[in-house]
Image (cartoon, rainbow, N blue to C red):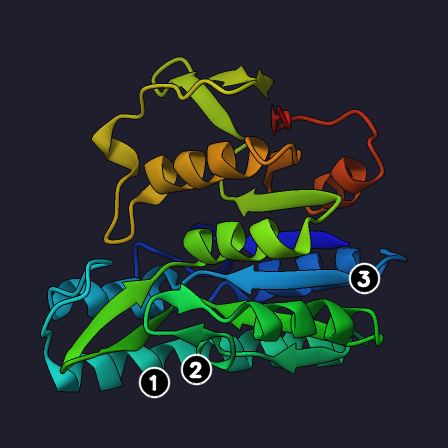
Amino acid sequence: MILIKLGGSIITNKEKSLTARKSTIDKIAKSLRKLNEPFVVVHGGGSFGHYWSVKYNMHTRPARYSQHGVAVVKNSMVSLNKIILDSFLKNRLNPYCLPPTDFMAGNRPVIKKVKEIEKIAKSNLVPVIFGDALWYGKKKSYILSGDKIMTILAKTLRPRLSIFVLNVDGVFSDFKTRNLIYEMKGQKPQVSKIAMDVTGGMRRKIEEATRISRLGLDVFFVNGNKPQRIIDAIKRKKFEGTLFRGI
């Protein structure tokens, strides 16, 4: 099975609030039709969820955030999720909307529920999960990022490969020169604040990818603007990107 994370920067225009990159989503969906094995899709919030998270000062740490803010963030993520579901349906995939509340209790995964996701994926449906504002308990809530969801799923489902689909080619050793790091093995590069957002941006992606690789699982970072690279990564063909090799 394959885990695929569609980053907020590839499915939305982060420079313009509440704007989805519908043509890019369609192109990715068309590419995913080429897969002949079960896969699960997780997507971020981009200019939808992140926009409102910043506005209401909500973070990944459980706290007593604005209840109205929680409602607004959740509503925006449902709107973005619907755009992705519609694209998948149009491109003859069988999307199955699966909000994180289906397998999370507070900020902990319900393992039995996580295992059900694999069964859904193997039934010719495509689970589509998304980062969200979640109820924690004691009047607290928090932001669960799509990147964190990838690690939660990988720990239990042990996918053959996890892929983070980005708006760039992969991890750069330097943002100015844009020198691509082709392979990582256990180490974490320094990431400048240029890539940060409310859920951690590129830094969080690298941290979660490193955690997954330390489970002995391979992780690829690929550029979603060239969706064939997603398929090439899965089929182990040569392509531009960063591999976090399982250790």
Image point (56%, 44%), residue name: 164
Q: Are marks 1 and 3 in contact (CB under 8 Å)?
A: no
Q: Which residue is label 2 attached to?
A: 78
The residue positioned 11% from the left and 64% from the top of the image is 57
- The kind of residue tagged 2 is Val
Classed neighbour count for the residue bearing mark 3: other residues with Cα under 10 Å, few (<14), some (14–19), many (≥20)? some
Residue 188 falls in which quadrant of the image?
top left
Rendered image: mark on residue 75:
1
Q: Residue at the spot x=55%, y=31% of the render?
A: 214
Picture quarter with the C terminus: top right
Tag 2: Cα neighbours inside 10 Å, few (<14), some, or many (≥20)? some
Name the kind of residue labelled 3 in the image. Pro
Q: Quadrant location of the N terminus?
A: bottom right
Q: Is residue 8 left or right of residue 191?
A: right
Lower position in the chain sequence, tag 1 or tag 3: 3
Which is in the foreground here, disc 3 or disc 2?
Answer: 3
| Residue 84 drawn at (x, y percent) | 58, 73
Q: CA distance from mark 1 to mark 3?
A: 29 Å
Residue at the spot x=63%, y=35% of the render?
220
Per the rendering, the mark at residue 38 is 3
